[in-house]
Image (cartoon, grey):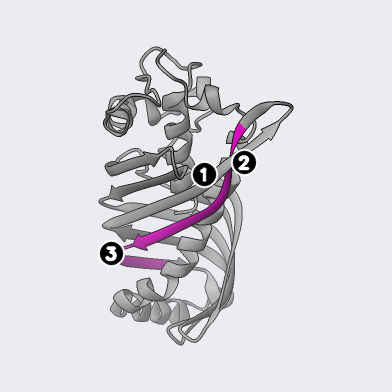
Amino acid sequence: MYSVGSIILFLVGSSFSNNLPSYIPRCYLDDPKLNECVLRAFNEIRPYVNNGIEEIGLPPLNPFVVSKLTVQQEWSLANYTLTATNYTIEGLNNYDIKEFRYDPETMTFRFKIEFHFLPMSASVEIDGHVIHIPIKGKGFVRVAYGPISAIFEVKGDMKKLKGIEYYTTKKANVGLDMGDGSFNFEGLFDNNQLLVRTTNEMLNANSAMVMKAITPAYEKLAAKGVMRFMKTLTKIPYHQLFPSSR
Protein backbone atom coordinates (compact mmCIF):
# COMPACT_ATOMS: atom_id res chain seq x y z
CA MET A 1 0.00 0.00 0.00
CA TYR A 2 3.02 2.27 -0.15
CA SER A 3 1.90 3.76 -3.46
CA VAL A 4 -1.85 4.11 -3.18
CA GLY A 5 -1.96 7.42 -1.35
CA SER A 6 0.62 9.14 -3.51
CA ILE A 7 -0.98 7.89 -6.73
CA ILE A 8 -4.47 8.98 -5.75
CA LEU A 9 -3.35 12.42 -4.62
CA PHE A 10 -1.35 12.80 -7.81
CA LEU A 11 -4.47 12.14 -9.82
CA VAL A 12 -6.52 14.46 -7.63
CA GLY A 13 -4.07 17.31 -8.10
CA SER A 14 -3.85 16.63 -11.81
CA SER A 15 -7.64 16.74 -12.16
CA PHE A 16 -7.57 20.37 -11.04
CA SER A 17 -4.56 21.43 -13.10
CA ASN A 18 -4.83 23.16 -16.45
CA ASN A 19 -1.77 21.37 -17.88
CA LEU A 20 -3.52 18.11 -18.69
CA PRO A 21 -4.07 15.75 -21.60
CA SER A 22 -7.42 16.44 -23.23
CA TYR A 23 -8.97 13.17 -22.02
CA ILE A 24 -8.70 14.13 -18.32
CA PRO A 25 -11.74 16.11 -17.10
CA ARG A 26 -11.11 19.56 -15.61
CA CYS A 27 -12.44 20.22 -12.12
CA TYR A 28 -12.74 23.70 -10.64
CA LEU A 29 -12.68 24.87 -7.04
CA ASP A 30 -15.83 26.98 -7.35
CA ASP A 31 -17.86 24.15 -8.91
CA PRO A 32 -20.62 23.18 -6.44
CA LYS A 33 -20.22 19.63 -7.75
CA LEU A 34 -16.45 19.61 -7.35
CA ASN A 35 -16.31 16.29 -5.54
CA GLU A 36 -18.50 14.58 -8.13
CA CYS A 37 -16.24 15.96 -10.86
CA VAL A 38 -13.13 14.44 -9.29
CA LEU A 39 -14.86 11.08 -8.87
CA ARG A 40 -15.88 11.18 -12.52
CA ALA A 41 -12.30 12.02 -13.51
CA PHE A 42 -11.01 8.92 -11.73
CA ASN A 43 -13.40 6.72 -13.70
CA GLU A 44 -12.75 8.37 -17.04
CA ILE A 45 -8.96 8.04 -16.90
CA ARG A 46 -9.04 4.39 -15.85
CA PRO A 47 -8.27 3.13 -19.42
CA TYR A 48 -5.13 5.29 -19.49
CA VAL A 49 -3.50 4.60 -16.12
CA ASN A 50 -2.45 1.03 -16.88
CA ASN A 51 0.62 2.21 -18.79
CA GLY A 52 0.98 5.52 -16.95
CA ILE A 53 0.28 9.07 -18.09
CA GLU A 54 3.57 10.60 -19.15
CA GLU A 55 2.20 14.16 -19.44
CA ILE A 56 1.54 14.35 -15.70
CA GLY A 57 4.37 12.08 -14.62
CA LEU A 58 2.14 9.23 -13.51
CA PRO A 59 4.09 5.94 -13.60
CA PRO A 60 2.55 2.71 -14.88
CA LEU A 61 0.11 1.28 -12.35
CA ASN A 62 0.08 -2.31 -13.55
CA PRO A 63 2.54 -3.27 -12.36
CA PHE A 64 3.71 -0.54 -9.99
CA VAL A 65 7.31 -1.08 -8.90
CA VAL A 66 9.18 0.40 -5.93
CA SER A 67 12.90 -0.23 -6.34
CA LYS A 68 13.58 -0.53 -2.61
CA LEU A 69 11.79 -0.03 0.68
CA THR A 70 12.33 -0.90 4.32
CA VAL A 71 9.61 -1.86 6.78
CA GLN A 72 10.15 -2.11 10.52
CA GLN A 73 7.71 -3.05 13.26
CA GLU A 74 8.43 -3.36 16.96
CA TRP A 75 5.55 -4.71 19.01
CA SER A 76 4.47 -8.00 20.50
CA LEU A 77 2.61 -9.43 17.49
CA ALA A 78 5.01 -8.17 14.82
CA ASN A 79 8.65 -7.49 15.54
CA TYR A 80 10.81 -7.56 12.41
CA THR A 81 12.88 -5.59 9.93
CA LEU A 82 12.26 -6.21 6.24
CA THR A 83 14.07 -4.81 3.20
CA ALA A 84 12.29 -5.37 -0.10
CA THR A 85 13.84 -4.93 -3.55
CA ASN A 86 11.77 -4.50 -6.72
CA TYR A 87 8.61 -4.46 -4.64
CA THR A 88 5.95 -5.03 -7.31
CA ILE A 89 2.21 -4.46 -6.94
CA GLU A 90 -0.20 -5.66 -9.60
CA GLY A 91 -3.76 -4.46 -10.13
CA LEU A 92 -3.57 -0.88 -8.84
CA ASN A 93 -5.37 0.15 -12.03
CA ASN A 94 -8.44 -1.78 -10.83
CA TYR A 95 -9.31 0.79 -8.20
CA ASP A 96 -12.78 1.80 -7.10
CA ILE A 97 -13.07 5.30 -5.65
CA LYS A 98 -16.00 5.25 -3.26
CA GLU A 99 -15.75 8.74 -1.84
CA PHE A 100 -13.87 11.99 -2.37
CA ARG A 101 -14.21 15.30 -0.55
CA TYR A 102 -12.12 18.42 -0.46
CA ASP A 103 -13.04 21.13 2.04
CA PRO A 104 -11.46 24.45 0.95
CA GLU A 105 -12.26 26.01 4.34
CA THR A 106 -10.22 23.47 6.34
CA MET A 107 -8.01 22.55 3.37
CA THR A 108 -8.66 18.88 4.04
CA PHE A 109 -8.84 15.99 1.57
CA ARG A 110 -10.74 12.84 2.46
CA PHE A 111 -11.15 9.93 0.10
CA LYS A 112 -11.90 6.22 0.18
CA ILE A 113 -10.56 3.72 -2.32
CA GLU A 114 -11.16 -0.01 -2.63
CA PHE A 115 -9.36 -2.87 -4.36
CA HIS A 116 -10.73 -6.36 -4.75
CA PHE A 117 -7.37 -8.09 -4.75
CA LEU A 118 -3.71 -6.97 -4.91
CA PRO A 119 -0.90 -9.45 -5.64
CA MET A 120 2.56 -8.28 -4.55
CA SER A 121 6.06 -9.73 -4.87
CA ALA A 122 9.63 -8.79 -3.96
CA SER A 123 13.10 -10.01 -3.21
CA VAL A 124 13.39 -9.70 0.56
CA GLU A 125 15.73 -9.80 3.49
CA ILE A 126 13.88 -10.21 6.78
CA ASP A 127 14.68 -10.89 10.41
CA GLY A 128 12.08 -11.19 13.16
CA HIS A 129 8.67 -12.69 13.77
CA VAL A 130 5.00 -12.14 13.00
CA ILE A 131 2.47 -13.49 15.53
CA HIS A 132 5.43 -15.37 17.06
CA ILE A 133 6.20 -17.16 13.78
CA PRO A 134 9.95 -16.72 13.09
CA ILE A 135 10.81 -15.34 9.64
CA LYS A 136 14.48 -14.92 8.82
CA GLY A 137 16.82 -14.84 5.86
CA LYS A 138 17.07 -13.74 2.24
CA GLY A 139 14.67 -14.91 -0.43
CA PHE A 140 11.63 -14.08 -2.47
CA VAL A 141 8.02 -13.58 -1.44
CA ARG A 142 4.67 -13.55 -3.18
CA VAL A 143 1.70 -12.28 -1.21
CA ALA A 144 -1.86 -11.30 -2.08
CA TYR A 145 -4.20 -9.15 0.01
CA GLY A 146 -7.86 -8.38 -0.36
CA PRO A 147 -10.39 -7.05 -0.39
CA ILE A 148 -8.71 -3.80 0.62
CA SER A 149 -10.43 -0.62 1.76
CA ALA A 150 -8.34 2.49 2.41
CA ILE A 151 -9.45 5.82 3.88
CA PHE A 152 -7.10 8.79 3.52
CA GLU A 153 -7.37 12.13 5.30
CA VAL A 154 -4.86 14.83 4.43
CA LYS A 155 -4.84 18.17 6.25
CA GLY A 156 -2.97 21.27 5.17
CA ASP A 157 -2.88 25.03 5.21
CA MET A 158 -1.61 27.92 3.11
CA LYS A 159 1.86 29.36 2.96
CA LYS A 160 2.92 32.45 1.05
CA LEU A 161 6.22 32.73 -0.79
CA LYS A 162 7.14 35.90 -2.66
CA GLY A 163 3.49 36.92 -2.60
CA ILE A 164 2.24 33.61 -4.05
CA GLU A 165 0.13 31.19 -2.01
CA TYR A 166 0.91 27.46 -1.92
CA TYR A 167 -0.85 24.49 -0.34
CA THR A 168 1.31 22.82 2.31
CA THR A 169 0.53 19.49 3.98
CA LYS A 170 0.55 19.30 7.76
CA LYS A 171 -0.71 15.79 8.46
CA ALA A 172 -1.80 12.60 6.70
CA ASN A 173 -3.80 9.80 8.30
CA VAL A 174 -4.47 6.46 6.64
CA GLY A 175 -6.85 3.75 7.79
CA LEU A 176 -6.65 0.34 6.13
CA ASP A 177 -8.85 -2.71 6.14
CA MET A 178 -6.74 -5.21 4.23
CA GLY A 179 -9.05 -8.20 4.29
CA ASP A 180 -7.33 -11.57 4.22
CA GLY A 181 -3.96 -12.60 2.85
CA SER A 182 -1.95 -15.43 1.34
CA PHE A 183 1.81 -15.84 1.76
CA ASN A 184 4.49 -17.75 -0.13
CA PHE A 185 8.11 -17.24 0.92
CA GLU A 186 11.02 -18.91 -0.88
CA GLY A 187 14.66 -19.29 0.08
CA LEU A 188 14.52 -18.20 3.73
CA PHE A 189 16.46 -19.86 6.55
CA ASP A 190 19.39 -20.43 4.17
CA ASN A 191 16.97 -22.20 1.84
CA ASN A 192 15.93 -24.76 4.43
CA GLN A 193 12.94 -26.21 2.60
CA LEU A 194 11.32 -27.71 5.70
CA LEU A 195 11.44 -24.44 7.64
CA VAL A 196 10.22 -22.44 4.66
CA ARG A 197 7.28 -24.79 4.07
CA THR A 198 6.37 -24.82 7.76
CA THR A 199 6.53 -21.01 7.92
CA ASN A 200 4.27 -20.62 4.88
CA GLU A 201 1.80 -23.11 6.30
CA MET A 202 1.67 -21.34 9.66
CA LEU A 203 1.29 -17.89 8.11
CA ASN A 204 -1.55 -19.01 5.86
CA ALA A 205 -3.31 -20.98 8.59
CA ASN A 206 -3.31 -17.83 10.74
CA SER A 207 -3.71 -15.30 7.94
CA ALA A 208 -6.37 -13.17 9.69
CA MET A 209 -4.06 -12.63 12.67
CA VAL A 210 -1.10 -11.97 10.38
CA MET A 211 -3.03 -9.31 8.48
CA LYS A 212 -4.08 -7.60 11.69
CA ALA A 213 -0.48 -7.61 12.89
CA ILE A 214 1.09 -6.13 9.73
CA THR A 215 -1.63 -3.60 8.84
CA PRO A 216 -0.12 -0.78 10.99
CA ALA A 217 3.11 -1.01 8.97
CA TYR A 218 1.21 -0.60 5.71
CA GLU A 219 -0.74 2.34 7.14
CA LYS A 220 2.53 4.02 8.06
CA LEU A 221 3.99 3.36 4.60
CA ALA A 222 0.89 4.76 2.92
CA ALA A 223 0.93 7.91 5.07
CA LYS A 224 4.63 8.38 4.35
CA GLY A 225 3.96 8.04 0.62
CA VAL A 226 1.21 10.67 0.82
CA MET A 227 3.44 13.13 2.66
CA ARG A 228 6.29 12.57 0.22
CA PHE A 229 4.06 13.18 -2.78
CA MET A 230 2.33 16.21 -1.27
CA LYS A 231 5.70 17.96 -1.11
CA THR A 232 5.55 18.15 -4.91
CA LEU A 233 2.26 20.06 -4.66
CA THR A 234 3.93 22.77 -2.60
CA LYS A 235 5.81 23.76 -5.75
CA ILE A 236 2.56 24.52 -7.60
CA PRO A 237 0.79 27.82 -6.81
CA TYR A 238 -2.59 27.21 -5.19
CA HIS A 239 -4.45 29.12 -7.90
CA GLN A 240 -2.99 26.74 -10.48
CA LEU A 241 -3.55 23.62 -8.43
CA PHE A 242 -7.17 24.56 -7.66
CA PRO A 243 -8.23 27.00 -10.39
CA SER A 244 -11.49 28.90 -10.55
CA SER A 245 -13.75 28.50 -13.57
CA ARG A 246 -13.87 32.27 -13.96
- Tell me the mark number nearer the camera, choosing from 3 and 1: 3
Q: Compare marks 2 and 3 and give the one earlier in the sequence.
A: 3
Q: Which residue is mark 3?
A: 179
Q: Secondary structure at mark 3?
A: loop
Q: Is residue 136 visible?
A: no
Amino acid at circle 3 = Gly
Q: Residue at x 50, y 54 (%)?
A: 172
Question: Which amino acid is tagged 2?
Answer: Lys
Could you tell me the amino acid type at mark 1? Val
Residue 26 is at least partly visible in this image: yes
Q: Quadrant of residue 157?
A: top right
Q: Which residues are magenta?
A: 166-184
Asked whether 31 or 198 is in front, the reply is 31
Label 1 or label 2, whichever comes before in sequence order: 1
Q: Report the quarter where the N terminus lies.
A: bottom left
Distance between the alpha carbons at the discs numbered 2 and 3: 31 Å
86 or 161, nearer to the observer: 161
Magenta stretch: dominant secondary structure: strand
Q: CA distance from mark 3 to mark 1?
A: 22 Å
x 42%, y 84%: residue = 131
Q: What is the number of callouts on the image?
A: 3
